Image: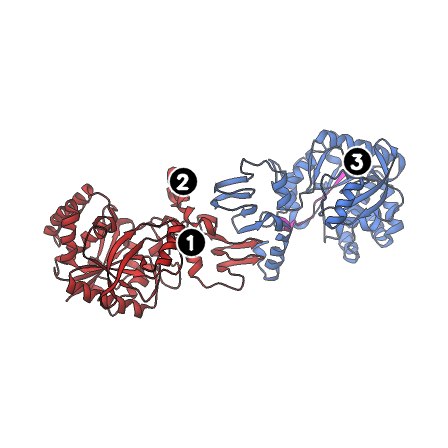
Chain colours: A blue, B red
Amino acid sequence: MELYAVIMAGGVGSRFWPRSKEKKPKQLIRIVGENTMIQDTVKRLEGLVANDHIFIITNKIQKLRVKEQLPQIPVENIVDEPFGKNTAACIGLAAVIIKNKNKNAVMITLPADHLIKDDEEFRKCLSKAVEFADKSKGLVTIGITPTRPETGYGYIQFDETEVGDNIFKVLTFAEKPNIETAQQFLQAGDFLWNSGIFIWRVDTILNEMKKYLPDLSEGLDKIYEVVGTSEFERQVVYVYGQLKSISIDYGVMEKSDKVFLTKADFYWNDVGNWEAVYEISDKDDEGNVVIGDVYTEKTFGSYIFSPRKFTAAIGVENLIIINTNESLLICHRNNAQDVRQVVDYLKMNKRNELV
Amino acid sequence: MELYAVIMAGGVGSRFWPRSKEKKPKQLIRIVGENTMIQDTVKRLEGLVANDHIFIITNKIQKLRVKEQLPQIPVENIVDEPFGKNTAACIGLAAVIIKNKNKNAVMITLPADHLIKDDEEFRKCLSKAVEFADKSKGLVTIGITPTRPETGYGYIQFDETEVGDNIFKVLTFAEKPNIETAQQFLQAGDFLWNSGIFIWRVDTILNEMKKYLPDLSEGLDKIYEVVGTSEFERQVVYVYGQLKSISIDYGVMEKSDKVFLTKADFYWNDVGNWEAVYEISDKDDEGNVVIGDVYTEKTFGSYIFSPRKFTAAIGVENLIIINTNESLLICHRNNAQDVRQVVDYLKMNKRNELV
């Protein structure tokens, strides 16, 4: 059995403005720690997937930076989509490229911008999922045991009868809930967070796409015919131009009857906004996270990023302060989700240099 | 009777950091409106004191900018002190310079960095005080009727028996009170805010200094001997080197028995910190004062200054945000007095480029 990994790295991360910008989105910056998120994502696969079996699906704007940050990945494995068409197309494109190498291969698909701690557990968990996906020809995802009534994640309900080593049948996918529903999910015990990590055989996922996304499947067949030739790029543009945007969750996972999950034994956080970054960062005695040239006084529970310019914070609480060369964000931690509205505002006002 | 004005402009304004810096303190920047505060102060004397009868007492660091901002004032009227030695020395120095021109002149002394509205009323009020000071040979100050229990100002208690047109005998000076005392002052009705504006004859103030500040008086006599000669600058350095720092309030006004006040009929604010600037500025519907390239959302009661760089504020309330080329200040409006501590911190850490 041959194993591949596909890292989806096309996001724009508007909730991380002003650090994250179109040319340098969340996955390409150092949000936590020494490495960028995509570097951590690749590093986490070490010993499980060989570098030349790792594919990065990105876009034209980000491709150069992806190459720079991941010199260990062969450049031909860094593929850009002409347009973002959501995860179903992205995964389909990767699948036909891998099919051209080995149609019986197993592929792990994972986002480039999630935080995972305990890489060893992560790899163990994936190994079991890979084995099961190969044998069962099922679609396997990873469910994370919820630790709080989070309203920012999707949930997966599963049947508690074990069908393999820590493997369970998925009953249903649930969208991001309101707080009451999230509390019910947490109490129920059979709802896990949807990690967006998938494991399946290439032939399995392409068959399921044929069944549930026939238009996409037809387009992918056309691309498959020219993989490795000079026609490839043109064909991808042609096919993508006609595709509908649809997520793999909505397009396949919620419809297929062969979906399984394995429960994660590692810490996972999708780091969806600045509040999440605050939560996962080490704090000082005042509950502050301070990065850069910063003076604080009577300041508590705040995340302050100001690497270049001196910042003084006095008498403030629970703020996100991001002071970059071009822009300044000051946001209450409770409003971290609203940061994307600044990006909308800037785009509407043609302030493209700032987004 | 010949009338002179002396504008004291040597302050560093550390509570207006980071806009105000040593080289460009509060009086030399545009805090409110189109002009700098010193420009407004000079303009306010129009029609009352001739430009060549206006003296500016400043220091070496600020002198060039003062000249640039006040081209209508003769350069020989812009005098720099070698060291800051508080208001008694500053006023004494100005007094001997004016004495050299006319020892019977009346001089108005006023700070360069206060906000006064209704210039017409201001000049009327001063005119009466000048007339009274000239005839009575008393020390006259201006008292402002308090409109709130302000703890940031000094107070003056007066005898309510009128001794001239809107002129009253001063009973005592009170330091900045705590809030309970400030409330009592406000209710009592015979306490006014100490404006720091003084009116007296040159011979009167020099006599009072001789009585209450003999060391200063002796030094001033030495300076007087060389006013207008090439020895002047060296003599000032020599005399100032030996002077104690003492305020005119503490050194003369609180001791003299010939102190009077006139009640102001104009709006006055010493604009002591960013909170005062917020209070005197026009606000938008959300109670914000926004200057520069700023986006706000769910933001209320805040003062945001960001002329060069884009700033986005989301979900914040009652903040002072000052985003300059070199530094960023984020301060709760209740903590406006603490801004000077940032300046102390920066000086202690030899970050002189920032103060």
Residue B39, percent from left and from top = 31, 62
- In the rendered image, residue A13 lying in the magenta stretch gets the answer yes
Per the rendered image, the range of residues in magenta is: A1-15
Q: Amino acid at mark 3?
A: Lys
Q: Chain of mark 3?
A: A
Q: Is residue A90 magenta?
A: no
Q: Secondary structure at mark 2?
A: helix
Of residues B310 and A165, the one drawn nearer to the viewer in this rendering: A165
Circle 1 residue: B274
Distance of label 1 from label 2 (alpha carbons): 19 Å
Does residue A207 appear to the left or right of B192 in the view shown? right
Q: Where does label 2 land, which residue? A: B345
Rate crowding at label 1 as few (under 14), some (14 to 19) or many (20 or more) other CA atoms within 10 Å: many
Same-chain check, marks 3 and 2: no
Task: Identify the disc placed on residue A263.
Answer: 3
Q: Amino acid at mark 1?
A: Trp
Disc 3 element: strand
How far apart marks 3 and 2 lie (CA) works out to 51 Å
Q: Could you tell me which quadrant the C terminus of chain B lies in?
A: top left
Amino acid at pointer 2: Tyr
To the question of a shared chain for discs 3 and 1, the answer is no
